[in-house]
Amino acid sequence: METISTARAHGGCQGVYRHRSSATGTDMTFSVFVPAHDEGEVLPVLWYLSGLTCTHANVTDKGEYRAACAAGRVILVAPDTSPRGEGVADDPAWDFGQGAGFYVDATAEPWAAHFRMWSYVTDELPALVAAEFPADMARQGITGHSMGGHGALTIGLRHPDRYRSVSAFAPIVAPSQVPWGEKALGGYLGDDRAAWRRHDAVALIEDGARLAELLVDQGADDQFLAEQLRPELLAEACEAAGIDLTLRLHPGYDHSYYFVSTFMGDHVAYHAERLWRTT
């Protein structure tokens, strides 16, 4: 692991790191904020998955999470959204290819060689974080924004014993039913829509996946709300499944990091409270 940069913040350390990924076959960059802690102490980990076109830098630079992480004594890890670089397949569209990995392991060509973000986020990067940082991997939470909210929900639903807390900002809740998701899942996984259901939060809940509770914040003036995000579908699925969903719709807020940063402190506190519970 190569250290790209470190900086002191709120008594802790904000770092940016790079390593060679066996999952993607590329160099991958990620950021980690570690709050102040005693020698030998380990802290809970909150994973933040970013959205379309983003890198680790979007939330690191604009997410305004460090004060809340320092107060809650929670490590925050922000990976990239896709493999990148020479020899990695790409697409001219902004919502597919590099920067738009959708947190799946691609099975269709030419994407299968490198676009293995599910394995990267759920297996390889956690092992690296556990080895290199003071992380208590028995206390993990996950959150994300937009495409990253989709990733947080699907990963949380498929690993309910690993993540003690799950939340999302403006997530794509039912990718099988919206244009962004149909394009991405069809492109990465092929035409078998049954395979898509493992990467669709609403479908996973319909098929029996369960979490005790979820927190979702959504801007009411989000330009993607009606066509791409469809939070009402998640509300319906959670109600039918008996999942305690807190869905907060905020008038005047859009899809940007102005929205995310406004409610980031709430989400960090939500996770910290659950991650530090003794029972």
Image (cartoon, grey):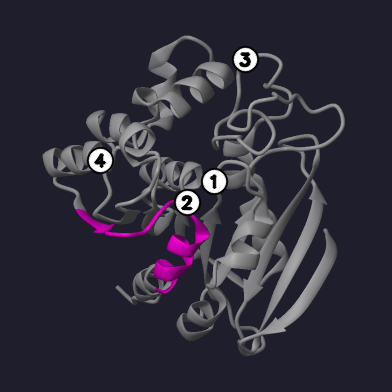
Q: Earlier in the sequence, mark 1 or mark 4?
A: 1
Mark 2, other Cα within 10 Å: few <14 / some 14–19 / many ≥20: many
Residue 51, disc: 1
Q: Amino acid at mark 3?
A: Ala
| Residue for badge 2 | 145
Q: Position of residue 118 (x, y in %)?
A: 57, 37
Are discs 2 and 4 less than 8 Å apart at CB?
no
Check disc 3 and report its element: helix, strand or loop: loop
Q: Residues within 10 Å of mark 3 (few under 14, many from 20)?
A: some
Q: Which residue bears the numbered disc 4?
A: 234
Describe residue 110's horizontal placement relative to residue 202 as left or right.
Answer: right
Q: Earlier in the sequence, mark 1 or mark 3?
A: 1
Q: Which type of secondary structure does the marked residue at label 1 adopt?
A: loop
Q: Earlier in the sequence, mark 2 or mark 1?
A: 1
First in sequence, mark 2 or 4: give its number. 2
Disc 1/disc 3 C-alpha distance (Å): 22 Å
